[in-house]
């Protein structure tokens, strides 16, 4: 432990010299706001990757924490709390059948009436009205724009605003997800004329989506110095109350080691998911956050499932074996899940065998639809032989019919744990005869959706669970492509036999019927196709210096930002 901190101290000295000699960052693209009178409370946070923009047409990749500033700028009708319950934000309450503002019609359609808080405001001070939600739905539903509506948003047949605080949504069919965050509002008073001009290319490239964003969250865009930092200022008219911290600066630090160095030196006071590895966090617990220090390191299960996705589209799959379920099944048995858990999550993670969490009460009903897994290299070799793969003179697998070599690539985002985990996976693949390239995605490509969606063989990725999980990742309409700016399902998986079941699931409300459909979908997608290889349920570090208080419950992916307006900073 002492050696690790001594090396870190040496690295800090080198980094300080490098920073002093570095060229000056480009001028800010967004002018800083004038400071308010009196002493401001200022918090510095560290993330690895810089956001590319805001709203519908920006890459929403969560890699490297780039989503964290976005989560501070934006709010919608509801938000998910740490225990998974839905809480109203811009809405006064959540519609329900009991209250009469959620109607289930005899023809299978639905109607909801939402009441928007009269105190809701945009960052420019203008009232946020029900018509701004109508406008948000119009943008999302416009076939000429590259938006990607969720499965529940696609069920909305119409949105109207009888008055400034009343939003009426009519649904084509029933859907259990209609009480969640359906879609975001957008300011018609800013974007309305450009939308009415019907020039999609001009609309998606408006400055609004990058440098001039106006949202309704607890913080607003203050200044943005590309490649260096982003500053968000407290929005005094935020609907849940003015944030207690006046200014939050996000430093873009590029890699976990640099972030760790900034935490230890005190230059960064908070680091949330997709920053430090679990191993780094455990080291911090023994030193920087040791008992009596006042600093906090929290390790929490965040509800994200990490797995290997494969390239299912013939135009990108190299070799074509990526599209063969038997090859994927063989590689599943080369995965040392215990070893991956040890290097990725310091042994604290939970192995995953499906997209159903281990504590889910439905698991016994789903068990028969979950593929068997064992770390069994001889079995993997036999499956590959049965699929027509034999070792060539140099030991690399060659397909006996096509002559194609098993030259594979695994892509992974930067991060100490991820890189080590991929090394464990690649070792198993090599032992059965696959040639493997371990590609750490360059920083400038981490948020490049097209690059990630056109991976030639496989990649490691994770997402938090949601009611539309099956549609998001296995629905035929969700495949990433140029028509949706590559923001869909990265592997492009599509099973025409499963698609009708996935569509039915999105409009089915009773739990028993939903479970029955999920069993059938999982059997096709996971047990028969092995469309993805489940690996582990993520453990996430949250790091707060002793001066930071009020962060409360951080359970759930990114949930610490749910109540960011209640954070405080002493001194």
Image (cartoon, rainbow, N blue to C red):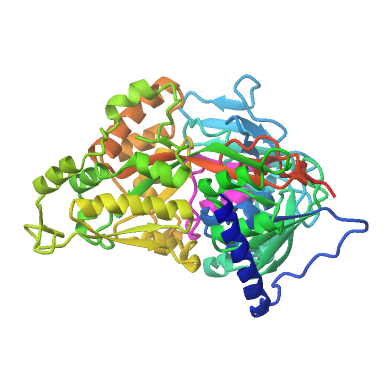
Is 560 or 521 nearer to us in this picture? 560
Residue 145 counted in the magenta span: yes
Q: Is residue 492 visible?
A: no
> Residue 383 appears at what percent x and percent y?
14, 43
> Residue 5 appears at what percent x and percent y?
60, 55
- Residue extending furthest toward the right: 38
Within the image, what quadrant is residue 540 found in? top right
Within the image, what quadrant is residue 221 found in? bottom right
Is 118 or 333 nearer to us in this picture? 333
> Residue 177 appears at what percent x and percent y?
52, 34
- Residue extending furthest toward the left: 401
Q: Which residues are magenta?
A: 134-161
> Residue 194 appears at what percent x and percent y?
63, 65
Is 305 or 118 nearer to us in this picture? 305
Residue at horizontal 53%, vertical 53%? 62
In the image, is 7 to the left or to the right of 37? left
In the image, is 217 to the left or to the right of 171? right
Residue at horizontal 56%, vertical 37%? 300
In the image, is 78 to the left or to the right of 365? right
Residue 326 counted in the magenta span: no
Q: Name above or below for residue 101 compared with residue 267.
A: above
Residue at horizontal 66%, vertical 32%? 87
Q: How many marks?
A: 0
Q: Is residue 70 visible?
A: yes
Is 3 or 319 nearer to us in this picture? 3
Residue at horizontal 24%, vertical 47%? 331
């Amino acid at each position: 432990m002492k050696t690790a901190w001594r090396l870190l101290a040496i690295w800090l000295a080198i980094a300080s010299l490098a920073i002093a000699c570095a060229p000056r960052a480009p001028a800010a693209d967004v002018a800083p706001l004038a400071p308010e009178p009196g002493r401001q409370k200022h918090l510095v946070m560290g993330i690895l990757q810089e956001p590319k923009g805001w709203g519908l047409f920006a890459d929403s990749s969560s890699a490297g924490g780039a989503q964290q500033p976005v989560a501070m700028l934006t709010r919608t009708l509801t938000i998910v709390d740490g225990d998974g319950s839905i809480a109203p934000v811009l809405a006064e309450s959540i519609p329900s059948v009991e209250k009469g503002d959620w109607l289930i019609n005899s023809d299978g359609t639905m109607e909801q009436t939402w009441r928007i808080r009269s105190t809701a405001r945009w960052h420019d001070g203008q009232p946020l009205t029900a018509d701004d939600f109508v406008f948000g739905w119009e943008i999302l539903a416009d076939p000429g724009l590259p938006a990607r509506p969720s499965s529940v948003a696609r069920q909305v047949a119409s949105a109207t605003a009888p008055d400034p605080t009343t939003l009426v949504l009519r649904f084509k069919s029933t859907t259990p997800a209609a009480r969640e965050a359906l879609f975001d509002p957008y300011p018609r008073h800013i974007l309305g004329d450009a939308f009415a001009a019907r020039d999609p290319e001009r609309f998606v490239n408006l400055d609004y989506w990058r440098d001039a964003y106006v949202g309704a969250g607890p913080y607003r865009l203050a200044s943005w110095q590309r490649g260096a930092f982003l500053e968000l200022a407290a929005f005094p008219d935020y609907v849940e109350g003015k944030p207690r911290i006046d200014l939050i600066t996000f430093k873009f630090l590029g890699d976990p080691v640099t972030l760790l160095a900034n935490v230890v030196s005190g230059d960064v006071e908070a680091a949330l998911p997709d920053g430090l590895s679990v191993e780094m966090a455990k080291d911090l617990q023994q030193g920087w956050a040791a008992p009596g220090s006042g600093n906090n390191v929290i390790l929490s299960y965040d509800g994200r499932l990490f797995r290997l996705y494969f390239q299912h589209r013939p135009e990108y799959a190299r070799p074509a074996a990526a599209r063969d379920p038997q090859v994927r099944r063989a590689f599943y048995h080369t995965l040392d899940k215990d070893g991956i858990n040890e290097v990725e999550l310091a042994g604290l993670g939970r192995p995953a065998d499906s997209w159903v969490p281990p504590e889910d009460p439905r698991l016994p009903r789903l068990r028969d639809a979950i593929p068997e897994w064992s770390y069994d290299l001889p079995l993997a070799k036999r499956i590959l032989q049965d699929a027509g793969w034999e070792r060539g003179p140099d030991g690399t697998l060659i397909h006996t019919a096509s002559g194609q070599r098993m030259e594979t690539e695994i892509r992974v985002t930067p991060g100490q744990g991820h890189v080590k985990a991929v090394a464990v996976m690649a070792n198993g693949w090599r032992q059965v005869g696959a040639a493997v390239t371990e590609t750490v995605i360059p920083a400038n490509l981490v948020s490049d959706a097209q690059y990630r969606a056109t991976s030639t063989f496989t990649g490691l990725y994770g997402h938090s669970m949601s009611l539309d999980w099956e549609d998001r990742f296995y629905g035929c309409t969700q495949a990433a492509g140029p028509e949706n700016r590559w923001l869909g399902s990265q592997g492009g998986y599509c099973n025409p036999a499963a698609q009708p079941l996935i569509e039915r699931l999105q409009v089915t409300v009773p739990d028993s019927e939903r479970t029955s459909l999920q069993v059938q979908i999982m059997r096709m997608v996971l047990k028969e196709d092995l469309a993805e290889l489940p690996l582990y349920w993520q453990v996430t570090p949250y790091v707060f210096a002793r001066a930071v208080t009020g962060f409360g419950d951080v359970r759930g992916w990114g949930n610490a930002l749910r109540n960011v307006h209640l954070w405080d900073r002493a001194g």
